[in-house]
Amino acid sequence: MRSASLTFLTGACLLQIAPELPAPRTILAAAAIAVLLFALRGRIINLLAAALLGATWAAFIASLALADALPRELEGKDIVVVGTVASLPHEFDGGTRFNFEVERVLTPEATIPQRIALSWYGRMTGPAGAAQVEPGERWRLVVRLQRPHGNANPHGFDYEAWLLEQGVRATGYVRPAGSANRRLDGFVPSVGHLVERARAALRRHIGTELEGKRYAGVIVALVIGDQRGIDQSDWDVFNRTGISHLVSISGLHVTMVAGLAAWAVSALWRRSFFVDGAALPLVLPAQKAAAVAGALAALLYVLLAGFGVPAQRTFYMLAAVAFALWTGRIATLSQVLCLALAVVVIIDPWAVLSAGFWLSFGAVAVILYANLGRVQPAKGWRRSLRMAAQTQYAVTVGLVPLTLFLFSQVSIVSPLANAVAIPVVSLVVTPLALAGALLPAPLAGWVLGLAHLLVDWLAHAMAWLAAGPLAVWSAPAPQPWILALALAGTAWMLAPLGWPHRWAGLAAWAPMLTQLSTTPDGGSFTVTAFDVGQGMALLVETNGHRLLYDAGPQYAPGADAAGRIILPYLRGRGIRALDALVVSHSDTDHAGGARTLLQGMEVASVHSSLAAAHPVVQEARSHTRCTAGQEWSWDGVRFEMLGPAPGSYADAGLKANARSCVLRVSASGKAIVLAGDIEAAQEAQLVQQRPASLRADVLLAPHHGSGTSSTTGFLAAVNPGIGIFQVGYRNRYRHPKREVYERYRARGIRRIRTDEAGAVTISFGSSIELTEYRASHPRYWYGR
């Protein structure tokens, strides 16, 4: 069973990296072949059948999900729908977001997916506000939708895959339609609605009792698994100290709740002899009653947690143990773990795409493997402490390769941080949070206040640990062969007692720990244009230096392109510092991520056209104002600042766009011009004053291809072979403008849009090589 579960997982994983789904006939034929192979005798044949069955099952589920699609012709159209609020709403600055289950479409001849994700901005004119939607309510709404689309970048979060896993097949927003948007029913009964309404009530109760408290979001996360109320700065601390797994409903917490329920029922059941006519152990053994109680308590807690993978895994394992106890079967922990793994993949084949899946199952697998031949009855606190230390050591060491592969960094202080945080959070804070969430006021306020106080103290201790320069080890994400070698070495180090020279397994880590970030050869350079939506961000790399041109947009308070896209990419590449950051101008789609970048990575100098009082200028270690004529060379690569003119800073009437830093990078006769948001007037000045400096092979389309830029004269002067348009999918500015886009085509310029291509990498050497991320890493859900 264990081998079959693992090969079933392998098949599901292979399907999730496929560029296209098999045809329905192929899926059916493969499933039939898998069934026939199972009928044959032979271990290898059966394992092949399990792998084939895993792939065909994942393909079948995916084909069903993708069939529920929004027609392209309905994107951006007003559609009237009736349905129910199907998730816990997330309130943000300016509105709320929630999933919506569509029951009816009132717009004639319109067909939309059953589950959509909506944002409701502002407040409606009726008696209820947009932020007042509650799970389970039935609404009539006027919406505008688009097909699922996310940013596609190396080492980045795949939003499209996440939407597919959530069953969301279209996203959009509620139109401000006055009384046309109205609540029809206060609550539509269903199990899912009841669970989500309960989660909303608990979150509201905790928020009321802890109003204004910084770590109220942590308490909410421990009770209902909703982590969206935790500040990004706190997440940074939790990640650097390796305790982020505790700031949620983890498997440890589910086990604790199940254990308490089982203990309470067992104690009461055994004492029922003292109640007249209630000799319950004679009807049902106390052990079986406790098992049922523990499994039911775990299920309830997991449902309140939002059914995340770590919580699922724990529930399935507890359920399997309870089933084995009821049926009198003997099941090893490894069998229970593999059974839980198979159930998770069967229910959610896309779970294999999440880091939580691998870390959750990996941690339990490491504990089981490392304790082979070591488990002894815990007698006395010294032996218990030694066993806890051995387990923490095994988990820390065992997950290093996987953590580096997933996040390109590993916490060095994690063992110490977890030694403090695990007992505090699991044994004290979580029970207090659960009790406080269920108690009425004022008792709830006192209990929740104590839990918050402990979290506050813990967070300060973790912040002190995270502040150390050696708190985190960073390295490039290991290649598959390096990861496989490191995993083999880890297995050697954690082998059972008696295994020879276990310390020698550390040698297999050497390639993983000594990787260096790749760099271009001397005299050449590489440019990566990130897919940041409607904004700009490009990384220029030479043999020994790196420069970031613009830092992308701010998406919402506390969320920007630097935190979501640029920093994960730099960490994934093993890049620990930047030599320069150029912020072309102050618009938030260019400067929105600059402060996050400066706080998250060492940046030697900043070049910008920003005012002296701008926060980015104030936080920069060294700042230089961009002016035409500035030049420098790195590793045989020349950097020339073509604009703005020095006198432009004295003109108070100029827009920020007009002062965009225009940078030309060249080497070996090849060049790229990064033009920011300059418009026709600035293009004309450059053509008149510096025509010879404009010639380039690649042009970053000025102002994202707006109608005010990319004039005929400017394009003639630059004469590029490639034009890069950094634009957002279906952006509200409609960039690039059709006439401008056609202007590039008419000149024979190859046009690349980041909303279609994803991140674009251009290598400038003896020739120019261009790689589009979506083309080089195709997935069957892209564009679907």
Image (cartoon, grey):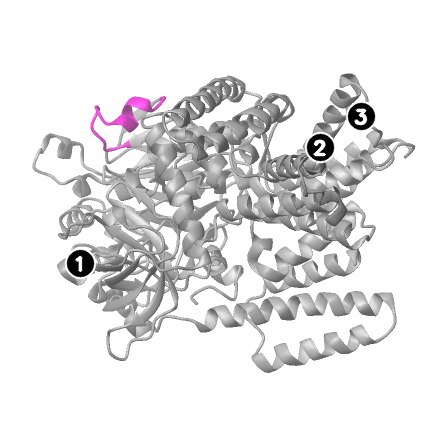
Q: Label 3, on which residue?
A: 378
Do callouts 3 and 1 mark residues in contact (Cβ within 8 Å)?
no
Alpha carbon separation for disc pair 2 and 3 = 23 Å
Residue 246 pos. (x, y %): 56, 33
Does the rendering let one see residue 326? yes
At label 2, the amino acid type is Val
Residue under the image location 44 percent in, 41 percent down? 226
Circle 1 SS class: loop
Q: Earlier in the sequence, mark 3 or mark 1?
A: 3
- Magenta residues span 608-621
Decide whether residue 67 is among the magenta residues.
no
In this rendering, the answer to whether 23 lies above or below 655 is below
Q: Earlier in the sequence, mark 2 or mark 3?
A: 3
Judged left or right of residue 124, residue 413 is right
Q: Is residue 500 above or below residue 79?
A: above
Which of labels 2 and 3 is toward the front? 3
* In front of the other: 256 or 546: 256
Q: Amino acid at mark 1?
A: Gly
**Which numbered circle lies on residue 397?**
2
Element assignment for label 3: loop
Quadrant (top left, top right, bottom left, bottom right) of the C terminus: bottom left
- Say the numbered circle drawn on residue 707: 1
Q: Residues within 10 Å of mark 3 (few under 14, many from 20)?
A: few
- Observer-side mark, 3 or 1, equals 3
Q: Is residue 619 left or right of residue 469?
A: left
Q: Residue at x 50, y 27 (%)?
A: 432
